[in-house]
Structure formats: structure tokens, C-alpha cells
Image (spheres, rainbow, N blue to C red):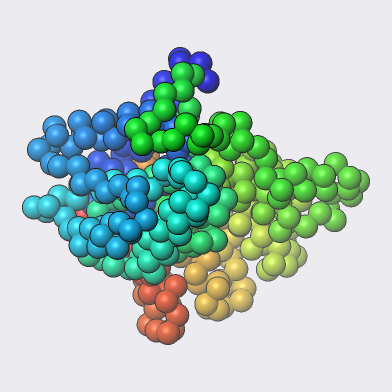
Amino acid sequence: MPEADYQAELDTIWRKLRPHLELTEGFALAVLFARHPAPVNALRTRLQEMLSMNTLPLRQFVLDKPEQHDVTLVGILTSRPLNGKHPPLWLEMWRDVGSEDERAEQRRAVWQVLSRLNERRFLLERDVSCPLVLVLPAELRMDIPSMAPDLWSVRSITADLPVPAVVVQPPRVETEYALPTLAQSREASAAEIEWRRLWQATADKQRLSPEAAFAAIEAALERVDYAAARHIVGEILPLLREGANAEPGTLRRRSIALNYSGQADSGMGRLEEARTAYAESLELRRRLREAVGDAPQTLRDLSVSLDNVGGVEKELGRLEEARTAYTESREIFAQLAKGFPAVPQYQNDLAVAEQHLAALS
């Protein structure tokens, strides 16, 4: 990547990352995928400089030896806010080097840490209560959503770090270690390729499965290609018509597509467009509640939409509107958590909703 493009992409990532680390008063998760030490070092230095201006330390953890996984995990889980402030934690687990056996052992250690953090998401939110920057090897990009689903579901930002034009080997990295290229991480996923095949091969687009489109959109969002995700939304959304006699299933699928539209627009910085999409999705989910009653899935869908609206209102600086949406979302999650105490998802949802509301105080 040319130096000018590399610096521009790095600056863009930092602009998106910084508010999550500087303004969040509680737990937030940023996941960065690295192929080269230069951008990792650059972002770490920027974070350190930002913290030093507020006389706060950078609490850094690096897992570069498999036997360190227990110490690393304990260090993260025992971290707490400092004097009422919530400085971020920085956890690097991206160095995947050495012989095949050494790399396999290191990978197992990474998965152990991720798995145990995933199991303790509630403790991260309740007790650690600080943003966490997680730096992982780029080749794990497609595995994380299934291996650490609870963590992945609450991430605030995901980014693929660029590779500079001049490759400089990092300390302790053996020369035979081949760094993946940026192009590899930008390739369309199997779900996206299949959707493109279906779109081109199907004359009657109304016969296409929305679920196939949703899988492609999710895959594009996971690799941070917001434009690709938005393009697929533009194809499937007109097919999910919401006429007067629309089935509840169609209304729900349209609301899902609108939420994806909001995610893609938000990722591209188009906050007003995201706000419009989220608001339309919320209106559909209110209609669904009127139509089918207070089924658990209907209530959770409604609360998620309210949370989406609250998030984009907050980003737009409309704090009262954000508080109204977050408050209603929390009330619904509280209803679910009380009605279904044995369902961990509802307890986690309620904790996140309370955190979002508290951040506005």
C-alpha cells in the first residue's frame, strides 16, 4: 500500500476508534486485526499520548508466549476504573509466529483467553467497566464471531489495520513468517459470492431468499466493507414490501434489512441516513408488537431497535432523544430478564442497556 494511502487509512481508523476509548464510561470492545507491527505500534502510541494528556496510564497486556495466558486473563479481569475514570485496556494477541507446533500452541492460548473472556462478558461489563482494545491476527477474522459470540455481539468497532508499503520485520518475528496481504482480507466471502450468483441467476427476484442476502450482508459487515453491505441491502430491501396485508414474517425481515442498512450507513459516517433506517425499523417492530403481542422474540427485536436508535442519536449529539430510546429499551430488557431469569442472553442484554443509559448521565 502506498505510504499516503497507508497513513490516510490509519488516520481514519484512529478517528473512528478514539471516541470509543475517550468518551465511553464503561465497557466497550474494539477489535483490531493486524498483519504487521507498524500500525499496531502507531495506534498504541496515539492512545498512550491521548491518555498521558489526562495523566492516565496505558494498561497494556501482550500475549506472546502461550504460558502467559493465565496471567494475561487475570490481569484483564482484575482491572478496574481509576479514580472514577475509565481508561482503556490494550490487549495484543496477534503475533502468530514460529514453527507449526509453536504457532498451534500459541493459537490455543489465544483461544483460551478469548473463550474465558467470552464467558465472563458480564464481569467485563460490570466490574472491569473500561474499554478493551483487542488486537488479533488477521487470519482469525472469520473465526471470531463463532468462537467468541457474546463478545463479538457487543463490539463497538472492528477494523483491519493497513500494511505499510515498506515491510519491516518486528522484533522476535522469525523471517519465515509470511504476513497475509491486505487483499486477502478484502476478498468477498462465500456468502457474498453465493448471493451474487443467486442475484444474477434468478430472473424473478421475488423468489430470492432474504436469509441468503442477510448472510451476505453480515459477512460484508464483518470484514468492514460497508459499501458492499449497503449495496446488498439496496437489492433485498425493495423486495420486502410492507403493504397493508404484509405477513408479520415479511415485516420482521424488512426491519432486519433496515437495521443492516443503518449499520452500513453508520459505518460510512452517514449518520442521518442511519437514523432514518433505524427509525423505520423501529416503527415496523412497534407494528409487529401490536400484531403478535409480547412474544419474547418480538420484545427483544423491539428493544434492539430502540438501542440502535439510541446509539445513532447519541452519535448525532441528540442526547435527550438517545436517553428516551435507551430508557424504553432498558425497560423492555428488564421485563424479559424478570420473566425469563434462566436465559443468560436477557440478563446480558439488560446489563448492556443499563450501561448505555448510564453513559449518558
Res 154 seen here? no
Left or right: 266, with 24 as reference point: right
- What residue is at 59 percent from the left and 60 percent from the top? 284
Q: Residue at x 48, y 50 (%)?
A: 103
Residue 136 in sight: yes
Q: Residue at x 85, y 56 (%)?
A: 207
How many dots with numbers? 0
Residue 272 point in image, percent of width and height? 48, 38
The answer to whether 21 is drawn above or below residue 107 in the figure is above
The percent position of residue 15, horizontal first and vertical second, equals: 36, 31
Q: Quadrant of residue 49?
A: top left
Q: Is residue 289 above or below residue 356?
A: below
Residue 156: x %, y % from top left: 40, 49
Q: Nearer the viewer, residue 112 or 297?
A: 112
* Quadrant of the image occupied by residue 243: bottom right
Residue in view at x 46 percent, y 18 percent:
166
Q: Closer to the camera, 101 or 136?
A: 101
Locate the C terminus by quadrant.
bottom left
354 or 240: nearer the viewer: 354
Residue 280, image x and y in percent?
Answer: 56, 52
Residue at the far right in the pictured view: 203
